[in-house]
Image: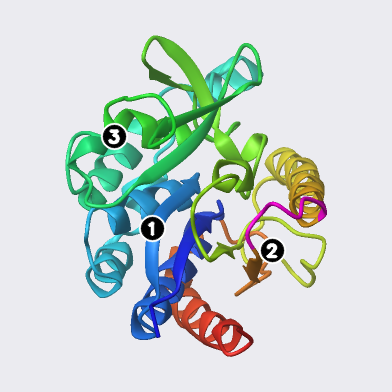
Amino acid sequence: MSRARVAVVLSGGGAKGAAHLGAARALAEARVEVVHWIGTSMGAVTAAALAGGETPAVLLERFGAIRRRDVLQRAPFALLRGVWAPAMLDPEPFRAAITRFLPGDRFADLAAPCTVTAVERLTGQVASFGTRGEDAPLLDALMAACALPPYFPPASVNGRELYDGGLRGPVPLGVAEGLDCDFVVVVDVGPGFDETGTPVHLPPPLLAAADTAIGWLMAGTTALMRERWDRNPANPPLLWVRPTSDRGATFAIERVPEYARAGHHAMQAALKQL
């Protein structure tokens, strides 16, 4: 019996993205062949690293070594500038953290096809980089894919300013349309209407309001994209995996091991349904 050939779509979700690594480990254990990695936001970083040939175990070790202070450094004078500040956080520490995951400088250096998405700041159009998209320096594309306002400013790629791809597609399913594969696996740790309970981290009220508003909009977009996929009989079967629905966990780095285990268990359970 031949191995199943799948395209894997990884959502945004910040620290919850560690679940992507647990899910990837379960796919490898089941001898599933991943023919295309797709991601946005933190899912873009993970997709590129896995497409580069790194093992989930090695990447999880690197992920777990990151501390909040490594990425959450306030932008200079952000408090003094108030609503006139371009963003709350300095992107450079985060850029340094992302380099720990990169297997090369460009998409051509990756061992497997990989596509990541971002959103043009001025037009709101989705920009795809890598396979089936435009070429760009890998680090620049990943910074754009993760540039979520109001935390980070837009990132420049090929002369354009771009924001986090999750603003248009928290689960970038559209990239998977037309791919030659047996089925498409989605690992969704982004905002959803199933999020309940007390937030893991509660930011200041204004940021909390922005997080809530953006989160509901993202959840609605994800539901619509999934419905659109299911209505097209030409699309491959969809295996949707939802390892966690924690609220307010974008920067819950202390929960990385927990989310990795959740991703592994959820993918194992999903594969048994096939």
Pinpoint residue 135: horizontal percent, then vertical percent: 33, 25
Residue on which the image places disc 2: 247
For marks 1 and 2 on the same chain, the one whose residue lies earlier in the sequence: 1
Start and end of the magenta stretch?
231-236
Would residue 17 appear left or right of 173 to someone viewing this image?
left
Q: CA distance from mark 2 to mark 3?
A: 28 Å
Give amino acid for label 1.
Answer: Val
For marks 1 and 3 on the same chain, the one whose residue lies earlier in the sequence: 1
Q: Is residue 21 visible?
A: yes
Mark linked to residue 139: 3
Q: CA distance from mark 1 to mark 3?
A: 22 Å
Q: Residues within 10 Å of mark 3 (few under 14, many from 20)?
A: many
Residue drawn at (31%, 25%), measured in percent from left and top?
136
Pinpoint residue 127: horizontal percent, then vertical percent: 52, 26
Give amino acid for label 3.
Answer: Leu
The local secondary structure at tag 3 comes to: helix
